[in-house]
Amino acid sequence: MTTGQIAALVGPATAEVQTYPLPEVAPGAVLLRVRRANVCGTDVHQWHYESMALRESGLGHEFVGEVVELGEGVTTDFAGEPVAVGDRVVAVYYLTCHRCPPCQRAEFNLCQNGLAEWIIRPDVPPYFRSAFATHYYVHPGQYFYKVPDEVDDASVAGANCGLAQMLFVMDEVGIGAGETLVVQGAGGLGLYAAAIAHERGARVIAIDGVPERLELARRFGATETISLAEYPEATDRAERVRELTGGIGADLVLEVTGVPASFVEAIDAVRVGGRIASVGNLNAAAEVTMTPGMVTRKSVHIHGVLRYHPWYLHRAVQFLARRRHLHPFEAFSDRSFPLAEVTDALKAGESRSVARVAIVP
Ligand SMILES: [Zn+2]
Ligand SMILES: [Zn+2]
C-alpha cells in the first residue's frame, strides 16, 4: 500500500475522506495503521466547528494502531518496552513540547503546543495527524505505548483519551475507599470513572437518561443509579443523592455530561467540603446561571481537569490488563462503521444511544 485515507473536516459538520501518499517516516517517528478509532464526544463537538483550534484539520483521537514503520532510532515505546513492526500500540493524541510555561511547571496536560501538529490541514505532509484514517503518524517525542496481547482492540481503543483522562482526574481530585462518587453521565468517561472508583473501594452512584447506559454502569461498578426519566428535575436528583448518602451528599461529583446545568446540579449534590471534577463541559461559550454563594457556604472544591499527563496512557493500558475480567470494556465500542461512513459514525456518536461508536477503517 502506498497511499492512505483520512477524514478531513472541510466545513461545519462536513467531513470528507481524502487520499494521500504514505509519508516518509522521520527519525524518532512511527507510522501506524489504524485498527480501530472511537467517536468521542469531543470529536462530535469538533465536527460541529465548536473547537476554535481544530477546524480545517483531521478528526479522531481515540484509537489503537499497529506499527507499519519505525523511524530511525525507535526501538522501544515510552515505557521502555521493545517495539517491532506489527505490534499494536496506543499513542497520546497531543504533544508535550517541554518548553512552554505549563511544561516548565510540569503541567504537561496543559502544554500550549499540544495541538501544534493536529491543527495542521491533512493536505500538508505527513498528512496523517488524526485517527479517523487508515494511518496515523506518531511524531518524534509523541508518547506511545505497546498494547499487551491479552487486551483486545475494542477494549483498548478508548484508553486514549477516555480511560487515561479518568485515571488522571481520580488522582488529581482524589477518591478514597468508603467515599461516594456521583458520576453525572454514564457514557464512556463515566463508565471508566466507575471502574476506577470501584477498584479504589469507593461507592459509585451513576446518573444518566439512557437505560442501557445505567445498566452498563452497574456492570462497571455502580451500585446505585439515578434515571433522568424517573427524576427529571435536577433538584430531585440532588435530593436523591442526599437520600442515598444518609443526608450528607456525595464526597465527589464528576461532571462528564458536557451539559452546563450539570455543574449547578453538582454543587447541589456534593457534600459540605466535598469535591467537584468538571471535565465534560468544554464549550467556551455555553453559559449557566448559578449561585456562587453556595460554593462558599458549602466550601466546595472545584477542579477543572483537561487532558492528562502522557504516561497516564500507560497506566490505562495496565488498568485494562488488570481489570479486564471484571468489567465489559469491549462493550464500549458496540457499533462500528467503515471510514467511508465517517459521517454516519459521527451522527451515531452524537445520538448518545451507545457508549462509544467505532470506526474500523
Ligand atoms: Zn509545552
Ligand atoms: Zn476523546
Image: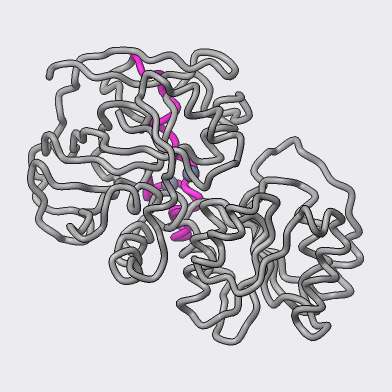
Indicate the quadrant where residue 194 lies.
bottom right
Q: Identify the residue shown where x is 36% and y is 38%.
A: 37
Q: Is residue 97 visible?
A: no
Quarter of the N terminus within the rendering = top left
For residue 35, side relative to residue 37 (left or right): left
Quarter of the C terminus within the rendering = top left
Indicate the quadrant where residue 353 lies.
top right
Please say if 61 is above or below 6: below
Please say if 183 is above or below 360: below
Horizontal and vertical percent position of residue 275: 69, 71
Most prominent secondary structure in the magenta stretch?
loop
Horizontal and vertical percent position of residue 19: 29, 12
Foreground pick, 345 / 124: 345
Please say if 193 is above or below 8: below
- Magenta stretch in the rendered image: 94-123
Q: Identify the residue shown where x is 57% and y is 77%.
A: 175
Q: Identify the residue shown where x is 69% and y is 60%.
A: 207
Horizontal and vertical percent position of residue 168: 48, 63
Whether the magenta-drawn stretch holds residue 104 is answered as yes
